[in-house]
Image (cartoon, helix red, strand yellow):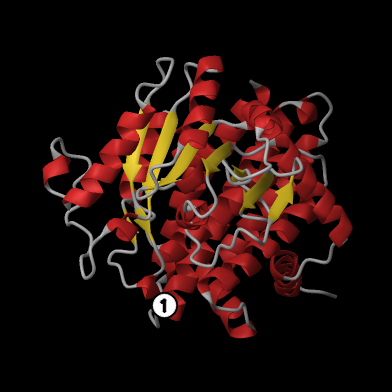
Amino acid sequence: MMTIKMRIGNFGERLWDAIFRPKIDEQALNAALGKARAAHPPPVVWLLGKTQAGKTSIIRSLTGSPDAEIGNGFQSCTKTARFYDHPMDLPIVRFLDTQGLGEVAYDPSEDIAFCESQAHLIIAVIKAGDSLQDAVFGVLRTVRERHPEWPVIIVQSCLHEVYSPGVGHVQPYPFTVSGWESSVPGDLARCLLFQRNTLGVLPGKGPVHWVPVDLTLPEDGFSPPDYGLESLWAAIEQASAMQLENRLRGDRGVRDLRQQTAHQHIVGYAKAAVAVGALPMVDLAMIPALQMKMLHSLGEIHGGEWNKRRISEFGGLLGGGFLAGYGLRLVGRSAIKVIPGYGQTLGAAYGAVTSAAVTFALGKTASYYLECSLAGKLPGKATLRDVFNQALNTGKGIATSFLGKEQA
């Protein structure tokens, strides 16, 4: 006869398999993720600019991935306009890019009409040293005539191309202070002011933000390589009343590129859990599988594969009590959702919020563990559980926000 201790041990093993080695139909999981994307479409950032204006660098810097390549991941939506989802598997932002404006034999009217119907924010990218911006400025004027309230961000990029040989960035970043013209090299000041004077005042009352930046790779030799990025984030914050910035970055304290990329993936999976967690009985299998994909993704981002040692170590730090509580959360959510009447309202909402909250908390805890482990400093049990509990509250807020947008 099986003892209670043996039953508990078997339950722990089954639960461990459910979390880290779930067996599930991959096709069914992909279908659930597809529903999540459809239920919570990400905000769209429309990027305007001529070829080689620096749009790739903008996307690389905003996504926090130094390896972001625009050629990989774009999906055509018209003959010449393309979406770029970030992250690719569960996007929390979509960049909408068009062919370089002003090119020969390119009529942008179809792209403009499409982009207007999709976008939440316009970022125009112009090279600081390129005085011929009539095509870009013409689109901005046309769009603002039809949408006078829309905010516009104009990024003046590639500042270093105007520098004299051997000259670096002016420190500290001067362009947020009145009178910056006198504190930067004369050639650069003349180029930036010429572009601003050429555009003049746009129609409408929506804000217009000018942001000089120089976003390069470390090997290019300019320090810092993300010159002006903080000001670009501030402009996004103001232009979108913080909504887009919060969805892109989440925690304001996230600065490190690896942490930032991990955070974006965690938010994406939490968002998927909102949709999956509302489905009766499905999430009992789906949520652990979704979380496994998230953990695998986080391992790749942090550069630390989930081998047997790390799995055992991570589970040991969280403790058996956590794993048992995790299993009860899953069973409890699914049980509530099949109760007649309550299951379609209270149960669905409860399942969605708790699924997303636990997914977010598990992701944050795993990310913290991987960061510490790879640095050779294991966190204590109490510290790791504190990370989980704090992230759980944040995850609840994220889930509630997503549900509110969906029901609005």
Pick the front one: 100 or 59: 100
Pick the front one: 345 or 149: 149
Q: Position of residue 325 (x, y in %)?
A: 61, 56
Q: Residue at x 81, y 54 (%)?
A: 30
Dividing the picture into quadrants, the one containing residue 337 is top right
Q: Residue at x 42, y 35 (%)?
A: 153
Q: Which residue type carries mark 1?
A: Leu
Dividing the picture into quadrants, the one containing residue 257 is bottom left
Circle 1 sits on which residue? Answer: 378
Q: Position of residue 367 (x, y in %)?
A: 50, 65
Q: Is residue 33 above or below residue 194?
A: below
Q: Residue at x 69, y 64 (%)?
A: 292
Left or right: where does residue 106 sit relative to residue 169?
A: right
Are there few (<14), some (14-19), or many (20+) residues within 10 Å of tag 1?
Answer: some
The residue most toward the front is 104
Q: Position of residue 397 (x, y in %)?
A: 51, 37
Q: Residue at x 76, y 73 (%)?
A: 3
Q: Is residue 77 above or below residue 143?
A: below
**Secondary structure beneath label 1:** loop
Q: Position of residue 226 (x, y in %)?
A: 35, 59
Left or right: where does residue 100 sit relative to residue 227?
A: right
Pick the front one: 350 or 186: 186
Pick the front one: 44 or 169: 169
How many numbered discs sit on the rendered protein?
Answer: 1
